[in-house]
Amino acid sequence: MRLIPELNSGAHVLICGASRGIGLALCAALLARDDVTQLWAVSREATTSAGLAKLAEQYGDRLKRVDCDARDEPSLEALVSETLAGCDHLHLVISALGILHQDGAKAEKGLAQLTMAGLQASFATNTFAPILLLKHLLPLLRRQPSTFAALSARVGSIGDNRLGGWYSYRASKAALNQLLHTASIELKRLNPASTVLAIHPGTTDTDLSRPFQTNVPEGQLFEAGFSADRILEVVGAHGPADSGTFWAWDDKPIVW
């Protein structure tokens, strides 16, 4: 299966949030493919990540590890102007950024637990960072086939919200979905061969989900490698005609 629809050449790929969890698993899955020419693994701790170091030993110069905080615009500007200076096009960008209970964010059970600090932390990583990443990478997505995908969450669906709770996380992912949908309209004008997708990876065995795994039904907790493979299957199945849509790991659409 092609990495993205209509791509007939070796791919230049960037993964943001690449140092652990699903992001690291995506890097491993992509580097194992013959059609990925170059991969940039971007995260706050890319150069000190043991997982990325192991991949670098195996794949050499095909993997570039880049320290960058996507919540910080000067850091994103440097990513494009310095690290990617010799790259004229990115075929695939995946944002694996997301927090639920880290960096001051909280999985609130009720309104009484909401704080400004928690809301700001959730939105900074889950919403602002992915769309700012897209903003700064836009010059590298304006020609040829290109796909920008961001990991969202089913709990960000307003239409599917029947349980409540997790205010900050739900709202930050819902806002991300709106931003991605809006960006897909602009990108379609700039590059008709572009695709923007929001993808729910399923509940994956990572630091994000670990405190809540006892409530996950049998068979519904995925290994990071499985989630990465399913994400790439979804990316490969959807081109420009589906730009601005929201998909689950099993390639089923999710209501906004």
Image (cartoon, grey):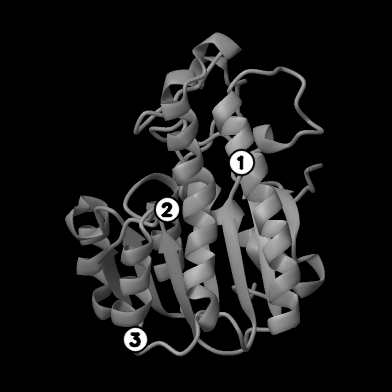
Q: Could you say whether the residue bearing mark 2 is in a helix, strand or loop?
A: helix
Q: CA distance from mark 3 to mark 1?
A: 31 Å
**Above or below 215: residue 18:** below
Looking at the image, the residue that sits furthest to the front is: 116
Q: Is residue 33 visible?
A: no
Q: Position of residue 158 (x, y in %)?
A: 76, 33
**Above or below 4: residue 160:** above
Q: State which tag comes first along the sequence, 2 or 3.
A: 2
The amino acid type found where label 1 is placed reads Lys
Q: State which tag comes first along the sequence, 2 or 1.
A: 2
Q: Residue at x 57, y 80 (%)?
A: 141
Q: Position of residue 137 (x, y in %)?
A: 49, 74
Residue of label 2? 23
Which of the labelled discs sits on residue 173, or is there none? 1
Q: CA distance from mark 2 to mark 3?
A: 23 Å
Q: Residue at x 60, y 24 (%)?
A: 167
Question: Callout 3: 10 Å neighbours few (<14), some, many (20+)?
Answer: few
Q: Position of residue 103 (x, y in %)?
A: 34, 33
